[in-house]
Amino acid sequence: MDSFTDLVRWYHYNSYVRKKYLKTLGELPTTKLRARTGASFPTTLQIFVHILDAYRWWFIFVMEDRLRDYRKLRTRVKSITQAKRMESETDSLVLNFIGSQRPADLDRRISWHEGKKVRSISLDALLHHMIEEELQHRGEINAVLWQMNIDPRIIGWDDWIKSAG
């Protein structure tokens, strides 16, 4: 399998697993969902929403060079219902984008303005970064859940392949 196909598969894997994590978070009592974590974001819900917000940041505001319009959702999403809606919208946005790309697109540069500076990143680097971003924060959610004595819904690649096949 070529590297582009593998990259696309990672996005489908993360989409599938993200929904399992959202289900686990939805089963938590509100007190645990909103408890201070001591992690990168104050609550488990905010860590999860940050993952979605990172996709919005890159796939909307950076790609369209509209940083001035960006507003963080992390503190505005207060419930699992809102998180589910945001996950569905974000997932659709990302998978539609991924489905529209071709291997030659990976070399394309994405440019945006940050104040007076113009920054850029290759699409390949951006797509790989977002895989890493999601995996890092899901690992963080795992640690927080383990501290609560809750087993997270860890879905390995092999388990995903079996469920998709």
Image (cartoon, rainbow, N blue to C red):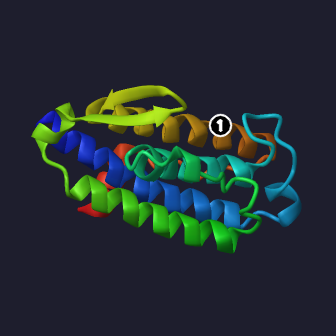
Q: Position of residue 115 (x, y in %)?
A: 55, 31
Looking at the image, residue 91 lies above or below residue 111: below
Residue 125, image x, y percentages: 33, 29
Nearer to me, 22 or 42:
42
User: For this rendering, which residue is in front, 138 or 147?
Assistant: 138
Residue furthest front as drawn = 116
Residue depicted at x 66% and y 56%:
73
The C terminus, quarter of image = bottom left
Please state the total of marks drawn on the protein image: 1
- Which image quadrant is residue 5 in? top left
- Locate residue 72 relative to residue 2 in the image: left or right: right
Classify residue 11 as left or right of residue 147.
Answer: left
What residue sits right under mark 1 in the picture? 140
Q: Is residue 107 above or below residue 83?
A: above
Residue at left offset 81%, top offset 46%: 148
Mark 1 lies on a secondary structure that is helix
